[in-house]
Image (cartoon, rainbow, N blue to C red):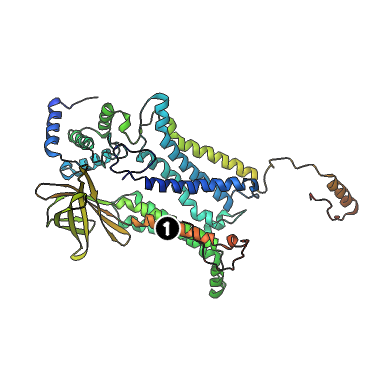
Amino acid sequence: VRSGVLTSVHAFASDPERGVFILAILLLTIGGSLTLFALRAGTLRQGGIFAPISREGALVLNNLFLAAACAAVFVGTLYPLALETVTGAKISVGAPFFNLTVLPILVPLALLIPLGQALPWKRGDMAAAMQRIGAALAIALIALLAVFGWTYGGPVLAPLGIGLGAWVIAGTLADLLARAFRAGTPLSVNLRRFAGLPRAAFGTAIAHVGVGVTIIGLAATAWDAETIATMRAGDRQRIAGYTLRLDAVTPEIGANFRQDTATMTVFRGDAEIGRIVSAKRIYLARGMPTTEAGLLTRGFSQLYVSVGEVLKDRAIHVRLYHKPFVLLIWLGALVMALGGLVSLADRRMRIGVPQGRKSGAPAPVPAE
Amino acid sequence: MRLRIPHLHRVALLVFLAISAPPAMAVSPEERLADPALEARARAISGEIRCPKCQSESIDESNADIAKDLRLLIRERLTAGDSDEAIRAFLVSRYGEFVLLKPRFGAHTMLLWLAPVILLGFGGVLVVVSLRRRAFPGPALATEPAELSDDEKRNLAAILKSGNAAPPQGKDT
């Protein structure tokens, strides 16, 4: 199904509803923020002064990296059009370009996340900040080495990615703990101080942990496994420690399609842990084949089955995928959103509301 | 560049496709090469070639017939001993630079490849300059301090005379 302002030439089905939904999101976020900016532009003033080594300085750096990554995507997207207009040459700019340009910009940004959070406003001390999160660096290095040793011979860069994610998470938590827990004060005082930290501090920490979780999920895609095979009923295929047995390929008739349904049983060792149903479907009106992928979720990892051709003797071509920790990518985004919500519930945001809510008011829920 | 595909070869390929290819799918089992190293190279190359038909996909992902043809072509030439670069050059000679998802570095793409570096550097300079300017305590103020107002001058004179600060007068102190 395609949806968008431009109709794809070989769209199987057009569904403007999704396009409208995406446009609505864009309108709400871009239009909303620009409107707010326009309304309040008169009240914006250059803020106070701050030293380069400070939370403000870190935020400026953060914006620099994010803006540069955005600009790389922008240039990569429009360059082919511009080049064709100017010289007539047709080139393509695809995923490899964006991987090569955006990642080197975002990796240093991720490295700086815990440091930025550990720096105080106005004027900071780099050595003191490093000291607060030094333990996190050790944890991240241990994680890196452990993953590297455990997966030795596999992808080389992925353990670095896991280490980066671990650094972001551990550094974030280390900073949060360092704010409340001081050596020499009784535990009860420390705990009270922890509970008394502003919600914005928790929001920041939660959001940054989300970034770390997503980084780990992305790094883990390096361990994706893929098997392409021809299977008949009763055949088994192994992938990433799982065994998939094709039980049957059954033809079925739907309302406006017919499909060959492949049912597989998944084993871990000898234990049966689930079934995956996938299908090759043909919509009769246009003779359009589609693939109904099958999915089995195990913890944060997923097994995918995609049926290709169904051969005459009911053998099928299948593609099996194991995607370890792939759900962390989405989970991280949810955690980031949660961090934003907690941060919005900060005292700063509640005080001065005309109705004057009491502290401990429930977190605001975004309008949907 | 050597073009080593003789006519017969292509005919054989077409016949093979005509017999063996009902609606194709992305990389099917019989396409794969027995040699895992060659197969891995084939996957790597085809992942970076844009499908001429389904332009949002690489030929590795595309179900289009042309993608399948190109996948087989790549494997055929790999088996014949061609280098990755030679295969890419061959595909470009047939289909244009359009098929490369990773554009080549050259005069026409210089700006594209350098843009992220230039933008980051330019932004970095901007940041350094503006941070310097508002640094605390700044080495140099961006603007000259404003002239003292009459009220302030009078106040200053009074302070110098008495050694005590008089409470500030006027609204702009």
A104 in relation to A245, above or below: above
Q: Identify which residue, A234 or A190, lies in the foreground.
A: A234
Q: Position of residue B134 (x, y in %)?
A: 64, 45
Q: Which residue is mark 1?
A: A334
- Name the secondary structure under disc 1: helix
Which quarter shows the N terminus of chain B?
Answer: top left
- Image x and y of residue A120, in percent: 58, 57
Residue occupying the point 34% across, 53% down: A220
Identify the residue at image location x=18%, y=51%: A259
In this view, which residue lies farthest toward the left?
A313
Residue A181 in view, yes or no: no
Q: Residue at x 17, y 55 (%)?
A: A262
Q: As drawn, is A59 to the left or to the right of B90?
A: right
In the rendered image, is residue B115 in sight? yes
Closer to us: B94 or A59? B94
Q: Residue at x 29, y 60 (%)?
A: A297
Count the numbered circles shown.
1
Which chain is indicated by disc 1? A
Q: Nearer the viewer, residue A16 or B105?
A: A16
Residue B78 lies in quadrant: top left
- What x and y, as percent, mark residue A223? 30, 52
Vertical placement of B67 versus B165: above or below?
Answer: above
Label 1 Cα neighbours within 10 Å, binned few <14 / some 14-19 / many ≥20: some
- Position of A28 with respect to B54 (left or right) is right
Amino acid type of the residue that numbered disc 1 sits on in the rendered structure: Leu
Residue B142, x across and y down, in percent: 68, 41
Q: Is residue A163 left or right of residue A68?
A: left
